[in-house]
C-alpha cells in the first residue's frame, strides 16, 4: 500500500504541475501547448489510480484513514483526468468524448462514496468506472 501511496503522491504532483501552466493569465486557452501526451496521463495517473481503486474494493476495503485518503485522492485524480483527456484537442472523436464524460460521472460517484467510506457504493460504482475506460480503449488503445 505504501508503494501505491507513493505513486499516488507523484501523480498528484504531476497533475498539479500540468494544471499550473497558465495561472498568470487565468484559464488555459485551447491553443496553449501541453507537454503531457495521452500516454503520459494514462501511465502516470490513470493506470496506477485505477489499480488502487480496484484494490480498494477487495475484501474488507480500506482499513486506515491513510488508505481511505489514498482512495479518495485517486478517485479525484480519475475525475480530473476525465477533463484532461478532452482538453487541448486530445479528444479524437465522439467515442473519446463520451467515454471521458462517463469517466467523470463514474469517478465523481466513486469519490463521493469514498468520502463517506461507503464500500458498498464504491463496489457499485467501480464497474461503471471500468466501463468508461473500456468504452474508449476498445476503439483507441493501441
Image (cartoon, rainbow, N blue to C red):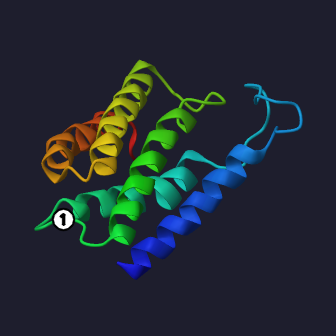
Farthest residue to the top: give it. 94
Residue 31, x across and y down, in percent: 78, 27
Farthest residue to the right: give it. 24
Q: Specify the quadrant that holds the N terminus.
A: bottom left
Q: Is residue 119 above or below residue 61?
A: above
Residue 64, x across and y down, in percent: 30, 72
Q: Residue, x 40% and y 58% (percent of image)?
A: 49
Q: Residue, x 77% and y 26% (percent of image)?
A: 29
Estimate how packed mark 1 is, as few (under 14), some (14 to 19) or many (20 or more) residues with alpha carbons within 10 Å: many
Q: Is residue 89 visible?
A: yes
Residue 141, x across and y down, in percent: 38, 44
Farthest residue to the bottom: give it. 2
Q: Is residue 133 visible?
A: no
Q: Is residue 67 above or below residue 127?
A: below
Q: Residue, x 48% and y 65% (percent of image)?
A: 8
Left or right, 65 with reference to 130: right
Q: Nearer the viewer, residue 113 or 123?
A: 113
Residue 135, x across and y down, in percent: 29, 33
Residue behind mark 1: 61
Q: Secondary structure at mark 1?
A: loop
Q: Is residue 101 above or below residue 7?
A: above
Q: Nearer the viewer, residue 131 or 49?
A: 49
Asked where in the image residue 34 lies, by quadrant, the reply is top right
**Total number of numbered discs in the rendering:** 1
Left or right, 104 with reference to 118: right
Q: Residue, x 49% and y 70% (percent of image)?
A: 7
Left or right, 61 with reference to 69: left
Q: Nearer the viewer, residue 116 or 130?
A: 116
Amino acid at each position: 500500500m505504501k508503494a501505491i501511496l507513493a505513486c499516488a503522491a507523484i501523480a498528484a504532483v504531476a497533475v498539479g504541475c500540468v494544471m499550473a501552466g497558465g495561472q498568470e493569465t487565468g484559464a488555459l486557452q485551447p491553443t496553449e501547448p501541453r507537454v503531457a501526451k495521452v500516454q503520459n496521463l494514462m501511465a502516470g495517473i490513470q493506470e496506477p489510480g485505477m489499480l488502487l481503486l480496484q484494490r480498494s474494493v477487495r475484501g474488507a476495503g480500506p482499513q486506515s484513514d491513510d488508505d481511505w485518503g489514498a482512495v479518495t485522492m485517486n478517485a479525484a485524480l480519475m475525475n480530473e483526468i476525465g477533463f484532461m483527456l478532452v482538453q487541448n484537442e486530445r479528444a479524437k472523436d465522439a467515442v473519446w468524448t463520451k467515454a471521458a464524460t462517463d469517466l467523470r460521472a463514474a469517478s465523481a460517484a466513486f469519490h463521493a462514496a469514498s468520502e463517506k467510506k461507503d464500500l458498498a457504493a464504491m463496489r457499485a460504482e467501480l464497474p461503471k468506472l471500468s466501463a468508461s475506460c473500456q468504452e474508449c480503449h476498445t476503439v483507441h488503445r493501441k
